[in-house]
Amino acid sequence: MAANRKLLTAAVACAAVFVGITGCSSEEKDPFDGMSADKIAKKASDASKGAGSFRVTGEGKQGGKAVNVDFSVGKSGDCTGKIGGGADGTAELLVSGDAQYMKGDEAFWKKAMGGSGKAAALKGKWVKSPNAKKEGVCDPDSMFQSKELKKLEREKDSEVDGKKAAVLTKKESGKKTTFYVAAEGKPYFLRVVTSGSEDPGTMNFSDYGKSVTVKAPAPGDVADMEELMKP
């Protein structure tokens, strides 16, 4: 009985002093309690864009062909990464300021140039092009478009790499997109999975707020495309 009284006293003390502070209760509070799935997604979109920098890695299919991506995006909008895989080759992409640079292997350039024999001349070289629109993977506003995050439903919570996550889904035209939003710390997007479509894929997001350094290639490493494309 004495042991039981000690246990009861300890429990009462815990409830009176630490509830809501030290987590004596085994129940964890839902950070999104009372919020609709669309509002959770909007919160995640704002937080992810607000971080400024992030890394996205993943794999999927485009036109029925496997594609892998690995990009680091800086707060300035600059980025660096790789895309590709399989018979179509692999390319490195680098965006710095108003310029975009791409360096592919021979298989990539053969595909991009329609089998042109000039592809070999681009080996080890970067090809420069304007980046006037500044859209795509290097633009957080395009990556985390809140206007696309509508008519979502919340499903049972899950985990992404050991982190608790709220699960939001959207179904339309035979495609299902599942968004995983961090339920601990800042509500960043952790993963986006597309299934049931011709181009399924999984994208993982990490390294929010971490510094990303991008340097433009040296002039000697950049190919002169106008000269190369002359007959």
Image: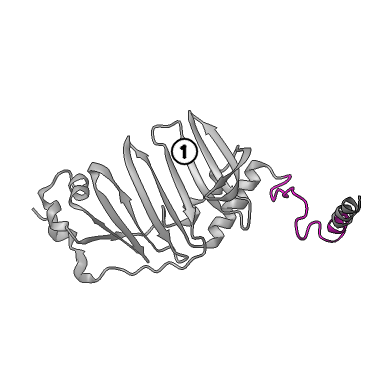
In the rendered image, the residue lying farthest to the left is 231
Q: Residue at x 55, y 56 (%)?
A: 48
Asked if the magenta segment contains residue 187, the reply would be no
What kind of residue is marked 1? Answer: Thr
Front residue of this view, candidates 64 and 157: 157
Q: What residue lies at 57% left-to-right and 54% top-to-bottom? A: 188
Q: Residue at x 30, y 48 (%)?
A: 84
Number of numbered labels in the structure image: 1
Residue 40: percent from left, percent from top: 64, 47
Q: Which secondary structure, mark 1?
A: strand
Instruction: Residue at 10%, 49% (x, y): give it.
Output: 117
25 relative position to 99: left or right: right
From what the image shows, is residue 94 above or below residue 118? below
Q: How is the image coloured?
A: one colour
**Percent x, y of residue 183:** 63, 51
Q: Is residue 175 above or below residue 8?
A: above
Q: Which residue is mark 1?
A: 194
Left or right: 170 as drawn, with respect to 222: right
The residues colored magenta run 12-34
Q: Residue furthest top?
A: 174
Q: Position of residue 164 (x, y in %)?
A: 60, 49
Q: Position of residue 82 (x, y in %)?
A: 33, 54
Q: Is residue 19 magenta?
A: yes
Taking depth in this image into account, of 9 and 19 the one nearest to the observer is 9
Crowding at mark 1 (Cα within 10 Å: few <14, some 14-19, many 20+): many
Q: Is residue 202 left or right of residue 109?
A: right
Q: Magenta: predominant secondary structure element?
A: loop
Q: Is residue 5 above or below residue 79?
A: above
